[in-house]
Amino acid sequence: MDRRSFIKKSSSFALASSCGASLLVGCQTSPNIKTTLLKTQQNNKIIAHKTVLENDDFAILQATTVKAPIFLHQQKNGKYVALLLSCTHQKCTVSVTPDKLVCPCHGAKFDKQGTVLQGPADKNLLALELSEQGNEIVISLP
């Protein structure tokens, strides 16, 4: 193989590798965190049993009709918050860490109520309407 062919093939491989890696980062979910798949009801809602929160103060839910996962969090005051884990900057899937939510694409950070802590995102995460019905939490989808 001559020098020109080697450089051309090496450059193509490097470009393809970096593009592939960026696609994987944009679609990643948080490691070691279980996601609960929930079927979307006819009224465009999902129903989560409170038992999904029994081991922690949050759960990751995935509705069958929504691309981004949903972060369900029980606050210290006992109230619940449901956030769409889609960054308001460029729609990358936001990762969950023990103390905050982080966008792996450009580093935006949000607190567990969805409030922007650090840009480039300038809008809070989408908070979903929810209600408690006994041992269930009913979440309205966007």
Image: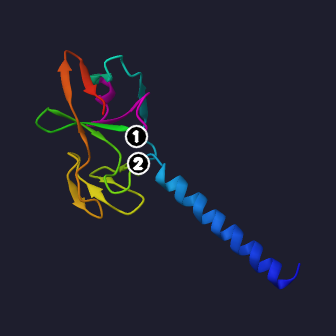
User: Is 54 inside the magenta-drawn segment?
Assistant: yes
Q: Give the residue at x 26% y 47%.
A: 125
Which of the 4 image quarters holds residue 23? bottom right
Q: Position of residue 86 (x, y in %)?
A: 35, 47
Badge 2 is on which residue?
Answer: 93
* CB-based contact (under 8 Å), mark 2 and mark 1: yes
Kind of residue at disc 2: Thr
Sort mark 2 into few (<14), some (14-19) or many (20+) by Cα contacts within 10 Å.
Answer: many
- 67 and 101: which is toward the camera: 67
Kind of residue at disc 1: Ala
Q: Give the residue at x 53% y 60%.
A: 22
Find numbered disc 1 in the image and state the secondary structure of the residue it sits on.
loop
Badge 1 is on which residue?
Answer: 68
Q: Position of residue 80 (x, y in %)?
A: 19, 33
Which of the 4 image quarters holds residue 107? bottom left
User: In the visual, does 116 lie left or right of 45?
Assistant: left
Q: Residue furthest left?
A: 77
